[in-house]
Image: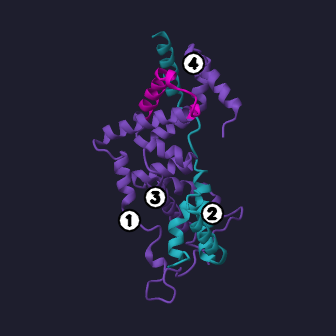
Amino acid sequence: MNTEFSCQEMIEVVTNYLDDALPRDEQQRFERHLSYCTGCNTYVDQIRETIRQTGMVPREESLPPALREEIVAQFRNWKRS
Amino acid sequence: MLGPETLSSETALVAALRCGDEDAFSALVDAYGAAMHRVALTFVRSSAVADEVVQEAWLGALRGLDRFEGRSALKTWLLRIVANIARTHAVREARSVPFSSLELAREASEYEPALPVDRFQGPDERHPQRWVSFPIPWSTEPDSALLSAETRELIADTIAGLPDGQRIVISLRDVEGWDSAEVCSVLELTETNQRVLLHRARAKVRAALEGYLTTEAP
């Protein structure tokens, strides 16, 4: 029985690891592999960085004014009904 | 999570809405309207349809106010309404069911490695399944390309080109910052399938960044 993750397996379970969704023994195997593998360390760092950068993609922070107006007008109608 | 203060102010807000308080409603639209619009756009792509979806969602929320029991945050409740309506519209637009949980589960069940297999040593090589060569670390120096607006644009473009399931899941999880349970509940996906879609999406965004950031590596 294989008790260690291979590098190829590591990159397939990284999302489960980051979501805290690995069974305890697999989580320990994951961390053990990370403790000695430079390549997997870099990969996991890059996934974390990818998540961080994705969170900084610019987003529309307010509604288009015309749409906002329509929504509020809709509220007035609803109130009357 | 939400403290008692937020919860009691949300209860007060809902009470004000029931009384037809327009200021309360406007405050709510300003707080969550943009997020609802973004979620709608994730599903339908056309901004005219997204506008319709958001209007319909607000109306749905007002009509359903009595069903809001405060078990979830008001924001989550509103976003779930908008996602459900957006999904219905997307299905109608496409005349197929690209957003059914069944279809998303099918997308998740297709085999697809996070990295091309040739990044790892083959079964006959010295160390099967180990890296052929390690990924090159990215510079995080203040002047690094990683921190540029161009990088964000590349990420946005990569996400826009992903298959529907992956695109929606990474948008909700990593752009909008929803947690796994929220995404599963809105998309009616299992945690496992949701995570498979997220995993592939992140791997592709990482690969795009790798291509961009390491082309000029020494």
User: Do dots 3 and 1 share one subunit?
Assistant: yes
Left or right of B139 in this view: B184: left
For disc 2, the marked residue is B145
The residue where tag 4 is placed is: B17
The residue indicated by pointer 3 is B196
Residue topped by disc 1: B111
The mark that comes first in sequence, 2 or 3, is: 2
Q: What amino acid is labelled 1 in the image?
A: Tyr
What x and y, as percent, mark residue A15? 54, 61
Q: What residue type is labelled 4?
A: Leu
For the residue marked with disc 3, what is the amino acid?
Val
Residue A43 screen position, x and y as percent: 58, 69
Image-based side of B198 in relation to B137, left or right:
left
Chain rendered purple:
B
Q: Spatial distance from mark 3 to mark 1, Cα to Cα?
A: 10 Å
As measured in the structure, the alpha-carbon distance from the residue carrying label 1 to the one carrying label 4 is: 49 Å
Q: Which amino acid, by three-letter code, is at mark 2? A: Ala
Q: Earlier in the sequence, mark 1 or mark 2?
A: 1
Q: Which residue is drawn at 37% across and 59% down?
A: B109
Residues under numbered marks 1 and 4 in contact, where contact means CB atoms less than 8 Å apart: no
- The local secondary structure at tag 4 comes to helix
Mark 1–mark 2 Cα distance, whole angstroms, equals: 33 Å
The Cα atoms of the two marked residues, 3 and 4, are separated by: 40 Å
The mark total stands at 4
| Chain of the residue under the numbered disc 2 shown in the image | B
Magenta-tinted stretch: B50-75
Q: Which residue is drawn at 54% across and 66% down?
A: B212
